[in-house]
Image (cartoon, rainbow, N blue to C red):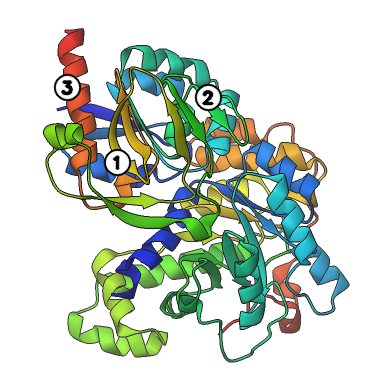
């Protein structure tokens, strides 16, 4: 069984751990750099990206996390997607630069613009994860404004990519951990499985 | 059930994102920036922190709009603001302004001594204080998407926060072992809707996140309430009434993340200046206790 870490500095990491378990993984909460050695992949949950960034820097996790991401899969949702990006703006802030995406923070507006929508996935998602509309919970969500040539778009909302994959990593601007549908987490576990095969 | 519809899930969703974080009281843009830099997950915009409200007296109202707007423009993290208990017009104004959360708060002077705001009528989410399970469930029935135990705001004394957190946890545990036929009588005793009592009995927790507030002044206080089951922490006067607000703010953020790690808590507690002066809550006359406001 796969052991997937969930970065537990702040945010809805418990919801992600439950979702991963329902999708068939073992989980472990990660709060220190030394704990990264015990997991084969990592989820960076939703929460406040400025808070996570502060703690990553203060607690010496920023560089170890970037190193981890060179070899192992990471899935970031909302704040996690912001941390994975190569470019973050409005306002600008540092990020891990593990995915070739540019992300605008709180791009839909304040909480009053938060929403639950049902989306028709792109053919690639359907092929890999199964057919049927997908619920997406957006909370003060960012928007992916640019994707690099290697980035695959799996789901769109109002024309903007909201679920993307590139190499080892996946990013969602919504919160699949707050819905009952486990297809997105299972998709990430497939990525983890493929990476394991490749590493061996 | 009311708390499963999309509108309510979006409100609770933001509370989910604030878990494991610290929400800090601020009175101007400069303090808000310090709070954000220190790692706050949100700020609460206020005219005066509770310790000053307590000292200066008078009627405490919703903060001036100019001030809240200045804070909203200064930071990228969520901004909350307080309205008086039952003052739905203040809440309407805060919603129109676009704050991310409204705290219907006992720290301000109540506007209605019988009724709280009907929070279901709003799109913006509400947090409300509670001292026990009955109070928490009444607020949730009215539409609150987050509960915070009240503690005693502006006291710098964590004793009431601990009391309220323990009371809610104990009453939840008791509910889970009741026979099904006993739940209706218990709902009546709690003064809470049976539907919510049933939900808590089945799940062993509140249907919305439960944060802690009122009297948290040190990293150790924050770790204490987290270990007692709080899911995040509100710090009011404790930060900007202390000697070095930025260092204290960072230390409390660190303590909430590593609440179960004594070595990290030691690091967080090291090299901090003096905390805010505290009050002996047991000697406060009933009329000066903020926690008894709300019904």
3 and 1 marks on the same chain: yes
- Asked if disc 1 and disc 2 are in contact, CB closer than 8 Å, the reply is no
Disc 2: host chain:
A
Quadrant, the C terminus of chain B: bottom right
- At 37% from the left edge and 46% from the top edge, which residue is drawn? A158
Mark 2 secondary-structure assignment: strand
Q: Quarter holding the N terminus of chain B?
A: bottom left
Residue drawn at x 83%, y 65% is B52
| Numbered disc 3: secondary structure | helix
Q: Residue at x 61, y 33 (%)?
A: B266
Please tell me if label 3 and label 2 are on a single chain. Answer: yes
Identify which residue, B186 or B137, lies in the foreground.
B137
**Which image quadrant for residue B271?**
top right
Tell which circle, 3 or 2, labels the residue nearer the N-terminal end.
2
Say which mark, if any, is on residue A17. Answer: 1
Check residue B19 in the rendering and tell me which mark sits there, or answer none: none
User: Residue B185's spot in the image, x, y percent?
Assistant: 30, 90
Numbered disc in front, either 3 or 1: 3
| Residue for badge 3 | A193
* Residue holding disc 2: A87
1 and 2 marks on the same chain:
yes
Query: Is B38 located above or below residue B159 in the figure?
Result: above
As drawn, A38 above or below B244: above
Q: Residues within 10 Å of mark 1 (few under 14, many from 20)?
A: many
Label 3 resides on the chain identified as: A
Sequence-wise, the earlier of marks 1 and 2 is 1
């Amino acid at each position: 069984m796969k052991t997937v870490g969930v970065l537990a500095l702040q945010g809805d990491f418990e919801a992600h751990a439950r979702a991963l378990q329902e999708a068939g993984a073992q989980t472990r909460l990660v709060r220190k750099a030394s704990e990264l050695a015990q997991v084969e992949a990592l989820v960076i949950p939703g929460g406040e990206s400025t808070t996570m960034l502060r703690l990553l820097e203060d607690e010496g996790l920023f560089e170890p996390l970037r190193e981890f991401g060179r070899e192992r899969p990471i899935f970031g949702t909302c704040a996690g997607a912001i941390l994975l990006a190569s470019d973050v703006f409005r306002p600008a802030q540092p990020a891990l630069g593990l995915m070739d995406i540019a992300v605008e923070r709180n791009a839909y507006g304040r909480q009053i613009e938060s929403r639950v929508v049902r989306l028709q996935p792109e053919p690639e998602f359907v092929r890999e994860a199964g057919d049927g509309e997908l619920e997406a919970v957006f909370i003060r969500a960012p928007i992916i404004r640019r994707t690099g040539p290697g980035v695959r778009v799996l789901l769109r909302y109002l024309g903007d990519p909201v679920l993307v994959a590139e190499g080892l990593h996946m990013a969602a601007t919504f919160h699949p951990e707050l819905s009952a549908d486990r297809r997105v987490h299972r998709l990430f576990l497939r990525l983890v499985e493929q990476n394991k095969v490749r590493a061996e | 059930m009311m708390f499963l519809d999309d509108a309510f899930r979006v409100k609770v969703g933001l509370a989910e994102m604030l878990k494991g974080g610290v929400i800090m009281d601020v009175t101007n843009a400069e303090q808000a920036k310090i709070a954000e830099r220190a790692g706050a997950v949100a700020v609460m915009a206020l005219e005066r922190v509770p310790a000053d409200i307590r000292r200066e007296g008078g009627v405490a109202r919703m903060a001036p709009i100019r001030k809240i707007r200045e804070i909203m423009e200064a930071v990228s993290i969520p901004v909350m603001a307080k309205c008086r208990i039952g003052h739905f017009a203040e809440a309407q104004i805060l919603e129109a302004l676009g704050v991310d959360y409204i705290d219907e708060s006992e720290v301000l002077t109540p506007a209605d001594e019988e009724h709280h705001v009907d929070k279901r009528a709003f799109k913006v989410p509400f947090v409300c204080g509670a001292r026990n399970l009955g109070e928490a469930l009444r607020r949730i029935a009215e539409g609150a998407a987050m509960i915070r135990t009240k503690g005693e705001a502006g006291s710098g004394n964590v004793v009431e926060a601990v009391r309220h957190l323990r009371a809610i946890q104990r009453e939840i545990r008791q509910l889970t072992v009741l026979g099904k036929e006993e739940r209706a009588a218990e709902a009546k005793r709690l003064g809470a809707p049976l539907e919510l009592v049933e939900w808590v009995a089945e799940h062993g927790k509140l249907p919305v996140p439960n944060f802690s507030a009122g009297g948290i002044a040190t990293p150790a206080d924050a770790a204490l309430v987290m270990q007692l089951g709080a899911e995040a922490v509100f710090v009011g006067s404790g930060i900007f009434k202390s000697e070095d607000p930025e260092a204290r703010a960072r230390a409390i953020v660190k303590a909430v993340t590593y609440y179960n790690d004594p070595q990290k808590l030691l690091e967080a507690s090291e090299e901090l200046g003096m905390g805010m002066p505290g009050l002996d809550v047991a000697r406060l006359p009933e009329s000066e206790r903020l926690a008894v406001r709300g019904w």
